[in-house]
Amino acid sequence: MSKIKIAIASGKGGTGKTMVAVNLCRIASESHSVAYLDCDVEAPNGYIFLKPDLTECFPVKQQIPLVDMNRCTGCGRCAAICQFHAIICLHKEVMVFPELCHACGGCMLVCPENAITEIGRDMGHIDIGKKDSIHFIQGVLNVGEPMAPPLIKAVKNVSHEADLVILDSSPGTSCPVVETVRDSALVVLVTDATPFGLHDLKLAVETLRILKLPFVVVVNRADAGDRKVFSYCSQEGIKILAEIPDDRRIAEAYSRGELIVESIPSYRPLFASLKDAVLREADLNSGRSK
Amino acid sequence: MKILISSQGNTPDSAVNPRFSRAPWFMVYDDALQTWTAFDNSKGMDVSRGAGIQAAQTVSDLGAKVVISGIMGPKAYKAMNAAGIQIYIGASNTVRQALEAYKNGKLTLADEKSASGV
């Protein structure tokens, strides 16, 4: 059986992506072999709720240029080709700004003196672990590191035996989100029912339409704001798979680092039917693309 | 010697642009010839990342040895400092007044601490 990838994303931050992702994982693990991938590498927090036993940890390196100044003639071609201003040539002084480097290797290719080689630089690490039958993988970006996508790619490349993969994305619509969701069978957009939630939901919807990815919506704290998210979704023909109420008990359990489906069993049916609906949608869309 | 001042406009009477790297214009004063030239930095204004480095490259390409601005980011500072360019911060009012302030020794020479971009 091939893997089904479901990405949990949002526009606005703090809408409940991780809450939905970890509870879906727990429920789905009763019927599927599940992997949870924390792709929110700037602030991974799924481990707080899944409490995995970490068994493996390895660094992720990014290739950056290393200039041999004995060979360099200061021609400046490396600086001219770099689209990210990661290498600069001032008065025959070549400097590398590693945090801006996208590791494309262009500077190395154009250097007529072969003065540039690459060295690996730590950008973060990956933790691998397990909680019961759930495979747990998270990327942790080093503090101050501006580029998450290479690490997210590495997280997605970790091999595991699960057939259902749940990817917990960072909020927003920028490169890390695109990297996380890009090859998913379905993207679940978690929003809250506020004007701010709706504003950023629209941005996320626009992004996913450009990426031609199928998506559905989960409304969290559904009774706390107004009805505009609902009218927007119905106008746009976007399916809302679940509405999670604004329940103080959920907030309390979450703040204690607990899974909602375990500490408030009355929410099990909501997440179980969300899981069924998500799998149905993912299946429907994979059928459509064939 | 060429002195480069970040500017909001393309004349010596334009206001100093407080931020260096994303300034719309760079006004370059040639001390020997006593002439002003304007460099359009709109390309640097809109760059998403690495504006400081691009600006440092521009300064180097224009052959300026002294740079005057309001504030300076760490990357622009690091690059220009390595290239032996003198960096003065704390300039305000017009470009011409900033040049006078520099000549009268009223501006601060930036160091690694003060070139924090704020």
Image (spheres, coloured by chain):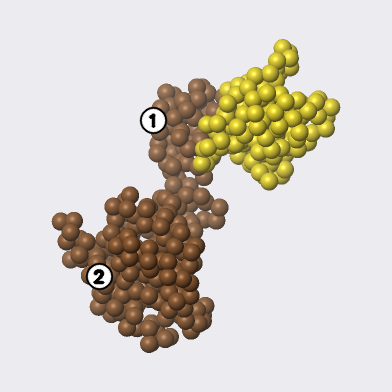
Chain colours: A brown, B yellow
Q: Which residue is mark 2?
A: A279
| Three-letter code for the amino acid on which mark 1 is drawn | Leu
User: Is A93 above or below relative to A264?
Assistant: above
Badge number at residue B114: none
Check the residue under mark 1 and report the chain it is in. Answer: A
Disc 1 on helix, strand or loop? helix
What residue is drawn where x is 62% and y is 34%?
A: B23
Q: Is residue B37 visible?
A: yes
Badge number at residue A109: 1
Q: Along the line of sight, which residue is nearer the eye, A81 or A278?
A: A278
Disc 2 on helix, strand or loop? helix
Mark found first going from the N terminus, 1 or 2:
1
What residue is drawn where x is 50% and y is 82%?
A: A248
What residue is drawn where x is 60% and y is 39%?
A: B75
User: Is A27 above or below relative to B87?
Assistant: below
Residue A142 % position (x, y): 52, 56
| Three-letter code for the amino acid on which mark 2 is drawn | Leu
Q: Quadrant of the C terminus of chain A?
A: bottom left
User: Is A228 above or below relative to A254?
Assistant: above
Residue A211 % position (x, y): 32, 51
Q: Residue furthest top?
A: B33
Within-10-Å neighbours for mark 1: few <14, some 14–19, many 20+: some
Within-10-Å neighbours for mark 2: few <14, some 14–19, many 20+: some
Mark in front: 1 vs 2? 2
